[in-house]
Image: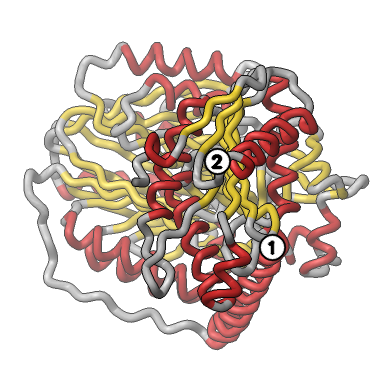
Amino acid sequence: MKPYSYTISKPSEIGGVIRAFRSLGVSGCSLLISIFTAYTKKDGLQEMVDALSLSFPEAEISGMTSSVCIEQGVNRTEKIIILFEVFEKTYIHTICFDHAPGKEDAVGWAVMDEINKISRPLCGIEILASQSDHRFSDFSPFLNVLTHELPGALPVWGALADSQTWPNHTYVFSKKYISTAGLVLRVYTGDISIMLNHVLGFRPLSRPLTVTAMDGPMIIKELDNKPAIYYYDKYIHTPDFQEQSLPFPLLQLADGYVHAHLPQGRTLDGGILFNIRCTVGTEMRLSYGDPELMLAETKKIWEQMHAFGGESAHILSCAARYQFLNKNLGDILANYNNVTPSFGIYAHGEIYRAGQRLVAAHLTGNVVVFREAAEAQQKDVSYNPVHLTQHMAHLLQMATFVSTAMKELEETKDALQFAATHDSLSGLFNRGAMEKYLAQCIKNNAEIGMPLSAIMIDLDHFKTINDTYGHSIGDAVIRTLADLMKKHTAGRGYAGRWGGDEFLIILPGSTLETAETLSIHMKDDLFHAHILPDDFPVSASFGVTIARQGELEQSFYKRIDNALYTSKENGKNRITIFDANGTAKALTMQETGDW
């Protein structure tokens, strides 16, 4: 494949473009003509499409509006880019649909019906979308259908149209279709390799905030039960909200991937308007743009582009990235273009795969590279370092300060949280934390029937150990038992120091037999641990029981305490097991293998 591009200022100049391309005399099995345009008058758009359709009746023609377009790695403002891509082994199928408010999933199924009619192998799908002048469209149901029906390895990407008067006059169009609330899908089939990547470059700033109220799918009404705008006012002071919130989107972590939601405005009652769906219960964090991270991510993409050796690249980047990176973005695009001729637009929302799932988000840079050649056609070029402008350098310094301060605060918070819930000597949960976990497990047992067993442990002759060998040895005994408890309960439950030389293990979801087996292993390991200076063995007494469904916490605790007391009264160094009805079973040293 090979790309040819032309820049014009108004639709009436399209004739010159047609003559210039015809004069090249190029041919192939198919031709894709893309129109990326800052011009947004419907009649003019139709004029260009009609002229191109008349001159190239076999070509697939489609495009979208954008406030800034990209040609050969250069940002073009107030221009129209006409891109001809000539293919040798690839065919393009164009599918167009209007949005159907409230029936977006039905549109998804209708699109899939059209895709399934295509006989050639699918290689990739590019989605060009526009949002209504009067309402934001919810693309999630549509994308969910495509996620479910399309192969997970199929490259799928796209963008939402932009304009200088956004959300007004944003169009997507093809030969016989033009809409401010529509979808144009370009389905690539045949024999072509497609490399798809996306970058973000934003880091968390605030503590986690949970969406607690929505007003429809696009307005976050409350975060942590406060008006959503409260946190923008608190952290960054936003008298001009839409302009000043640009570098501070909300970040969402979902399925291991980070997505950005960029505010589009505020409501009178303190809600925040987005053009991307959100749901109650979603965890968000205010974030900030990190220029150094952005440059590192874009360099990594350049390296992948260089290794891939593509023949043409589509850049579908967020318009907010253009405003944020400004002059530095020109240097980044120049690097891309040195490797692969690069064309595209700046969007008001981007579509990409997060793992298997298709999502719409903001502040993302989609980089899509095409190659029909069987092997990479690598160029002998090197990466030109991008030097931050003075403004961005100052921003980087501030970002570094914020990042370091946030890390220190998180570490302090984690340390305080650990100290509040853990015993300092053993590293086990303290009694307060264990009481909380026990209450929750008792509740789960009563409400959903989850089994609950527990083990209570008391070190034998611990006062004698302290008096004979000193408190440092006594501390070593406690730490050794604690390590054994952590080892044997990892992933099974909660281990805590109940007080002094008493310890408790809570095992939600475990049977009485499991608790018995764990007790035997811990008792045996402790007995052979060689802790004391004279190698005299350290023993412990164990009480084990299981809860009846719906049993009260006080009754359950009394039974396990009685089981431990029975072990102590019957000579120590043994395990006593009470079933749910209080029937006792004792395991002596011989039975647990300690002789």
Viewer can see residue 17: no
Q: Note whether 472 is above or below 430 in the view shown.
A: below
CA gap between label 2 and label 1 equals 19 Å
List the residue tagged with mark 2.
493
Query: Does dot 1 land on a helix, a strand or a loop?
Result: helix
Where is residue 123? Give x, y as percent: 24, 32
The crowding category of the residue bearing disc 2, from other C-alpha atoms within 10 Å (few below 14, some 14 to 19, many at least 20), is: some
Q: Nearer the viewer, residue 38 or 393?
A: 393
Which amino acid lies under the numbered mark 2 shown in the image of this protein? Gly
Residue at image coords 75%, 34%: 558
Q: Nearer the viewer, residue 564 or 2?
A: 564
Q: Is residue 372 left or right of residue 184?
A: left
Where is residue 114? Give x, y as percent: 38, 14
Mark 2 vs mark 1, foreground winner is 2
Query: Does dot 2 land on a helix, a strand or a loop?
Result: loop
Q: Quadrant of residue 494?
A: top right
List the residue tagged with mark 1.
417
Residue sitting farthest toward the left: 375
Q: Nearer the viewer, residue 448 or 271?
A: 448
Residue at image coords 59%, 20%: 104
Q: Note whether 106 is above or below 203 in the view shown.
A: above
Q: How is the image coloured?
A: secondary structure
Instruction: Please identify the quadrant where the N terminus is shown.
Output: top left
Residue at image coords 80%, 59%: 231
Q: Which of marks 1 and 2 precedes in the sequence?
A: 1
- Residue 565 marker: none
Q: Note whether 269 is above or below 245 in the view shown.
A: above
Where is residue 236? Give x, y as percent: 77, 69
Q: Is residue 75 left or right of residue 270?
A: left
Q: Quadrant of residue 94?
A: top left
Which amino acid lies under the numbered mark 1 shown in the image of this protein? Gln
Residue at image coords 63%, 30%: 138
